[in-house]
Image (cartoon, rainbow, N blue to C red):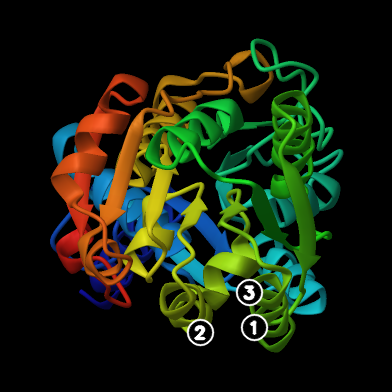
């Protein structure tokens, strides 16, 4: 009898061992769904990038439910600290994630370097110029273990909107962080546009909120008629600290995303970050579930057609939202309203 019991226990042990050595599954005791571990790192805590992250998470949850799989998300934010960023990526590698998502250019570049020679795909989001950043060989054929979504800004379009709003602009302020890759091409394009039009411009830069605040105050002293900022994360992070400086001086601030307008800029123009986040998640799913290779998966770009006007600032500047919307409508696919807040309510 003892021998029979011993054999039975041995069989149970072997069965349990075989079960434990199977593919990754949910460990909640309720589901046998395949689990994919995804590491997401955000560059800074700002309205645009946070909106992307939330929509990546929600879209992956929806895809997981539809496909009968689970995406286990490990999320962290490096707050623009390169040492913290490298540690986060090292942790993702140590945790054997199936894929990494890098939100913003510096994160994507660090992930590209850290995963070289490793079998870890990377999907980036909100990288304005992935070719110039040398993340991909081309938008159509990335060529390595990395691909993703771009928030490329049509600078000429936002400049057209600026001068359609006020045809009497004589001097434009360019406010940006000189170290932000996302600003390089857009500022170059803005200068070329203004030079061609014969409009004077003055550049002011900053790398911290304090420096950006001083730069904003300097632009008021410079006597600019309007200010332009591209999809610059440093300025975006500082917008709540500077928008009243421009509003009180009667200077409209035009910027490259609706999140700037949410945080107090007069007008944001650019991609829909909700859609960008969802499409980033779709690319993650295509790579992990459908076996697509990042090297052969084209970078996804979006129509820069939505203008978002802050009606609080519009009124403070003595402008009519309806009049401005009518003027700029030919240059946009859509014109939307927003009021000043720190974050999007329900992700818009």
Q: Residue 192: which quarter of the image?
A: top right
Image point 27% across, 75% down: which residue? 341
**Label pair 1/3, CB-CB below 8 angstroms:** no
Residue 215 drawn at (x, y percent): 72, 76
Left or right, 41 with respect to 136, comes to left
The quadrant holding residue 79 is bottom right
Give the labeled residue for mark 2: 241
Residue ID at (86%, 38%): 117
Quadrant of the snapshot with the N terminus: bottom left
Query: In the picture provided, is 271 more to the left or to the right than 178?
Result: left
Residue contact at pointers 1 and 2, CB within 8 angstroms: yes
- For label 1, the SS is helix
Q: Secondary structure at mark 3?
A: helix
Q: Residue at x 37, y 52 (%)?
A: 258
Q: Is residue 247 above or below residue 285?
A: below
| Residue 80 percent location from the top left of the image | 70, 73
Quadrant of the snapshot with the C terminus: bottom left
Q: What's the mark number on residue 38?
A: none
**CA distance separating discs 1 and 2:** 7 Å
**Which secondary structure lies at badge 2?**
helix
Question: For mark 1, what is the residue?
Answer: 213
Give whichever of 258, 140 is nearer the camera.
Answer: 258
Please say if the residues under marks 3 and 2 sit with CB atoms less than 8 Å apart: no
Q: CA distance from mark 3 to mark 2?
A: 15 Å
Work out how far the residue at label 1 is from the one at label 3, CA to CA, in angstroms. 11 Å
Q: Residues within 10 Å of mark 1 (few under 14, many from 20)?
A: many
**Taking 180 as reference, is 36 left or right?**
left
Residue 293 falls left or right of residue 218: left
Give the farthest residue toward the bottom. Answer: 210
Disc sitting over residue 220 in the figure? 3
């Amino acid at each position: 009898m003892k021998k029979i019991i011993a054999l039975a226990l041995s069989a149970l042990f072997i069965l349990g061992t075989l079960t434990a050595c199977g593919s990754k599954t949910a460990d909640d005791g309720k589901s046998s769904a395949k689990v994919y571990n995804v590491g997401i790192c955000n560059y800074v805590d700002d309205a645009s990038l946070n909106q992307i992250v939330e929509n990546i998470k929600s879209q992956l949850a929806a895809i997981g439910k539809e496909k009968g799989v689970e995406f286990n998300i490990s999320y962290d934010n490096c707050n623009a600290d390169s040492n913290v960023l490298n540690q986060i990526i090292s942790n993702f590698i140590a945790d054997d994630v199936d894929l990494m998502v890098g939100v913003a250019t510096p994160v994507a570049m660090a992930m590209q370097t850290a995963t070289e020679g490793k079998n870890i795909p990377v999907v980036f989001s909100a990288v304005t110029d992935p070719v110039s950043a040398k993340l991909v060989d081309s938008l159509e054929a990335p060529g390595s273990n990395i691909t993703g979504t771009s928030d490329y800004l049509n600078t000429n379009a936002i400049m057209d909107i600026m001068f359609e709003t006020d045809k009497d602009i004589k001097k434009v302020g360019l406010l940006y962080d000189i170290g932000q890759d996302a600003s390089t091409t857009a500022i170059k394009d803005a200068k070329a546009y203004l030079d061609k039009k014969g409009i004077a411009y003055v550049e002011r830069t900053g790398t911290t909120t304090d420096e950006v605040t001083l730069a904003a105050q300097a632009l008021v002293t410079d006597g600019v008629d309007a200010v332009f900022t591209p999809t610059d994360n440093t300025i975006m992070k500082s917008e709540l600290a500077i928008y009243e400086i421009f509003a009180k001086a009667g200077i409209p601030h035009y910027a490259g995303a609706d999140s700037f307008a949410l945080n107090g800029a007069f007008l944001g123009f650019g991609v829909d970050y909700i859609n960008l986040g969802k499409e980033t998640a779709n690319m993650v799913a295509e790579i992990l579930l459908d076996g697509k290779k990042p090297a052969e998966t084209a970078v996804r770009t979006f129509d820069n057609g939505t203008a978002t006007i802050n009606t609080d600032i519009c009124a403070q500047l003595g402008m009519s939202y309806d009049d401005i919307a009518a003027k700029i409508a030919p240059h946009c696919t859509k014109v939307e309203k927003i009021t000043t807040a720190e974050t999007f309510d329900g992700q818009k």
